[in-house]
Image: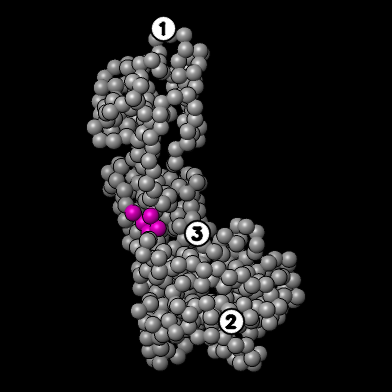
């Protein structure tokens, strides 16, 4: 496994003093990585810990956890065990079991990093894994982002020390060092996409082309180098980033496809969407920007939504939520998901100021409540003129994605206040000593 040491040093993926969590299933690859890093802790000046995630797929999966625990003790490293219910996650989310297992596993890793238990996660992917990944991405319609395969270092926390090491070298290492491992019988189940590629396609490909694995991996490296060069010439200063949201000017979509696709990948990665964005999604977003009507939307994997909002394309990865609002009308403060806090105060000073609305609370029916808009709502504009609330919000150029989360003070279908936007002419302040001030805090 000399290639592992060389690769670690070449990529500078380990820093002195770091705590490295190794994802260990108990299989040959992860056991080789755990043993190698445990044996070389002093050389790299790091602390190694073993992390085992039981996906809850097999009835006897607890045996793998016990095996890894025993081996971690034998190697002299700390051991962490976690269990997730991948079948339930797959059913609840409507995703494949493979995807659910990956999401759950990375959820555990991310939590450990966030809590400061570990600094990085070492994963046991090797050259065969890389070749399989590249092929699978191509089959699914990915562009260069997928064709370049897995990165040695991702997000500065996920590292793959064995990415240039062959499966044969790993098995030789295990034999020479007498390292035990367990076989997962589900690895022979070809209903899983990766198993099908590995057990069926790759075996046939290698029979005809013996150097196919290294050739595919080298192809991925070439793609990665080209991609890095093109990305270095992309300037995306006009993109606007918020928490879990990015806005891209429509003008960006007039560039050649090579630029457009990378702008989109750069954008979605910044807001946490790192998987399953394919060429078909890129084309759909581009078409939406150039020919879609204002307010149109499309959906991406992981509940992400893309909106056409006037001069921008907005991509949000907020998961779909069922948010209910039913707040009584009174002085105080209440929080609204995806919007902010609404503050209601009794005041004597009605001096206009940005972000504040003033109403004569005596004109508001006692049965009025704060809620979200609904069909049939009507609004009398300040200064006169009644129209549908939907039409009024369109006139104010409020994006569609925001309209359903704006609190309105209403009684039946009569809207008196649109929080942060405007008040109805029916509750305007005239000759009164006190009024209610309504302010929105983001």
Scheme by which the image is coloured: one colour
Q: Which residue is mark 1?
A: 431
User: Which quadrant would residue 373 be assigned to in this image?
Assistant: top left
Q: x%, y% of residue 371?
A: 36, 33
Element type at mark 3: helix
Image marks 2 and 1: residues in contact by CB distance under 8 Å: no
- CA gap between label 2 and label 1 equals 79 Å
- How far apart marks 1 and 3 lie (CA) works out to 62 Å
Q: Of all residues shown, which one is farthest toward the top?
A: 431
Within-10-Å neighbours for mark 1: few <14, some 14–19, many 20+: few
Relative horizontal placement of residue 286, taking residue 78 as reference (left or right):
left
Q: Earlier in the sequence, mark 2 or mark 1?
A: 2
Question: Over which residues does the magenta segment extend?
Answer: 299-303
x, y percent for residue 130 = 49, 77
Q: Position of residue 186 (x, y in %)?
A: 43, 81
Q: Is residue 237 above or below residue 107?
A: above
Q: Say what secondary structure mark 1 lies in.
A: loop
Residue 75 among those drawn in magenta: no
* Residue highlighted by disc 3: 231
Q: Which mark's residue is nearer the viewer, 2 or 1?
A: 2
The quarter of the picture where the N terminus appears is: bottom right
Query: Callout 3: 10 Å neighbours few (<14), some, many (20+)?
Result: some
Please give the name of the residue rendered at 49% of the width and 18% of the height, measured from the top-left corner.
346
Mark 2 touching mark 3, by CB under 8 A?
A: no
Q: Which residue is mark 2?
A: 67
Q: At x 30% / y 41%, what residue is drawn?
A: 294
């Amino acid at each position: 496994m000399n290639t592992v040491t060389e690769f670690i040093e070449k990529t500078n993926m380990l820093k002195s003093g770091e705590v490295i969590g190794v994802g260990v299933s108990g299989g040959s690859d992860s056991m080789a990585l755990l043993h190698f890093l445990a044996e070389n802790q002093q050389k790299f000046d790091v602390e190694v810990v073993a992390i085992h995630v039981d996906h809850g797929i097999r009835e006897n999966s607890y045996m793998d956890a016990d095996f890894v625990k025993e081996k971690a003790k034998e190697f002299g490293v700390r051991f962490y065990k976690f269990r997730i219910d991948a079948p339930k996650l797959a059913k609840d989310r409507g995703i494949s079991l493979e995807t659910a297992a990956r999401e759950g596993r990375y959820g555990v890793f991310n939590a450990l990093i966030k809590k400061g238990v570990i600094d990085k996660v070492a994963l046991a992917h090797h050259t065969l894994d890389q070749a399989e990944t590249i092929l699978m991405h191509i089959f699914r319609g990915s562009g260069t982002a997928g064709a370049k395969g897995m990165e040695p270092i991702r997000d500065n926390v996920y590292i793959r020390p064995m990415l240039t090491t062959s499966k044969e070298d790993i098995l030789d290492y295990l034999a020479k060092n007498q390292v035990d491992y367990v076989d997962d019988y589900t690895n022979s189940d070809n209903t899983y996409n990766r198993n099908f590629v590995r057990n069926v396609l790759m075996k046939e490909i290698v029979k005809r082309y013996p150097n196919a694995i290294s050739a595919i991996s080298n192809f991925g490296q070439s793609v990665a180098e080209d991609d890095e060069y093109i990305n270095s010439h992309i300037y995306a200063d006009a993109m606007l980033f918020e928490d879990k949201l990015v806005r891209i000017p429509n003008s960006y979509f007039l560039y050649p496809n090579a630029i457009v696709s990378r702008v989109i990948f750069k954008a979605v990665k910044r807001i946490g969407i790192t998987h399953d964005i394919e060429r078909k999604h890129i084309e759909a977003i581009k078409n939406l920007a150039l020919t879609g009507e204002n307010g149109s939307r499309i959906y991406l994997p992981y509940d992400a939504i893309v909106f056409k909002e006037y001069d921008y394309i907005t991509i949000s990865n907020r998961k779909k939520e069922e948010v209910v609002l039913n707040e009584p009308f009174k002085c105080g403060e209440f929080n609204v998901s995806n919007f902010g806090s609404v503050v209601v105060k009794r005041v004597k000073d009605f001096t206009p100021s940005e972000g504040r609305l003033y109403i004569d609370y005596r004109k508001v029916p006692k049965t009025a409540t704060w809620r979200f808009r609904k069909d049939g709502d009507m609004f009398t504009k300040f200064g006169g003129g009644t129209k549908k609330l939907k039409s009024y919000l369109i006139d104010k150029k409020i994006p569609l994605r925001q309209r359903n989360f704006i609190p309105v003070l209403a009684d039946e279908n009569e809207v008196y206040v649109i929080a942060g936007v405007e008040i109805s002419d029916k509750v305007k302040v005239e000759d009164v000593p006190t009024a209610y001030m309504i302010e929105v805090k983001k």
